[in-house]
């Protein structure tokens, strides 16, 4: 699918807003336990897909938190994963000697998070953990495991809750799967 035609798909709900909220409450509790006593946790969101997730997640964390963002290349405007990952926008703050939590929307091939965590490790954080809202384990090309995962999903293209298809549908409150209609 290289040229998206926006007139020809519908979105079927896969994970409701309520289920997402409940899962985030549980995850936040586990993250809080892990980082209990930290003097500062830098929560790093990967732009742009994680912006809704990170907003909900940090509001469940009763910890001294700072928020920063990093943008890495991903799908461009289509559905094909680019295996070559580039950093488009770096962090604003320092993470040396800090506790860091990387927040991603989806792990697909694994290339993005594998590359980003290697890159962040060169900045010498004390602790670097990662969380992804969604995981498509059957699509993995490089071995990568997040420390926390929201939901495992099948190999379907999804949108909503911050996640886009060619920049659309990020504003849906739920996760839905894209279904093409043969006109
Ligand atoms: P990876 O490098 O293949 O693991 O790709 C991860 C990135 O691909 C995610 O951050 C998403 O931006 C994008 N991606 C993967 N699957 C989907 C999807 O189903 N819908 C929208 N974007 C996706
Ligand atoms: Mg992404």
Image (cartoon, rainbow, N blue to C red):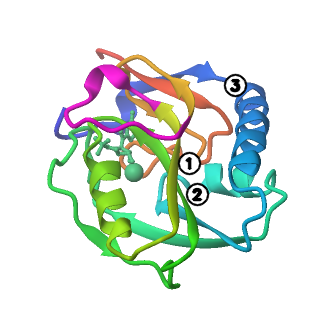
x and y, in percent, of residue 51 in the image = 58, 57
Secondary structure mostly seen in the magenta stretch:
loop
Q: Position of residue 10 (x, y in %)?
A: 47, 24
Q: Whole-Å distance between the Cαs marked 1 and 3?
A: 14 Å
Reading the chain from its start, which is encountered first: label 2 or label 1? 2
Q: Quadrant of residue 67?
A: bottom right
Residue at the (65%, 32%) spot, across then down: 174
Residue at 51% x, 78% y: name it.
Answer: 95
- Quarter in which the C terminus is drawn: top left
Circles 2 and 1: CB distance less than 8 Å? yes
Disc 2 marks which residue?
51
Mark 3 element type: loop
Is residue 130 positioned above or below 100 on the image?
above
User: Tag 2: Cα neighbours inside 10 Å, few (<14), some, or many (≥20)?
Assistant: many
Which numbered tag is attached to residue 1?
none
Determine the secondary structure under disc 2. helix
Which of these two is toward me, 5 or 150? 150
Label 3, on which residue?
Answer: 16
């Amino acid at each position: 699918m290289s040229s998206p035609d926006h007139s020809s798909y519908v979105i079927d709900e896969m994970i409701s807003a309520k289920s997402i909220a409940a899962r985030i409450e549980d995850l936040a509790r586990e993250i809080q336990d892990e980082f209990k006593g930290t003097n500062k946790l830098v929560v790093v969101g990967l732009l742009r897909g994680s912006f809704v997730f990170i907003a909900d997640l940090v509001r469940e964390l009763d910890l001294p938190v700072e928020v920063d963002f990093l943008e890495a290349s991903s799908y461009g405007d289509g559905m094909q994963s680019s295996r070559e990952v580039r950093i488009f926008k770096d962090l604003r703050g320092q993470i040396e000697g800090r506790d860091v939590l990387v927040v991603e929307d989806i792990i697909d091939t694994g290339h993005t998070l594998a590359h980003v965590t290697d890159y962040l490790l060169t900045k010498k954080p004390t602790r670097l953990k990662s969380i992804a809202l969604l995981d498509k384990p059957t699509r993995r090309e490089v071995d990568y495991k997040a420390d926390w995962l929201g939901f495992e999903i099948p190999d379907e293209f999804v949108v909503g809750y911050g996640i886009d298809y060619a920049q659309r549908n990020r504003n849906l409150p739920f996760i839905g799967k894209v279904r093409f209609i043969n006109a």
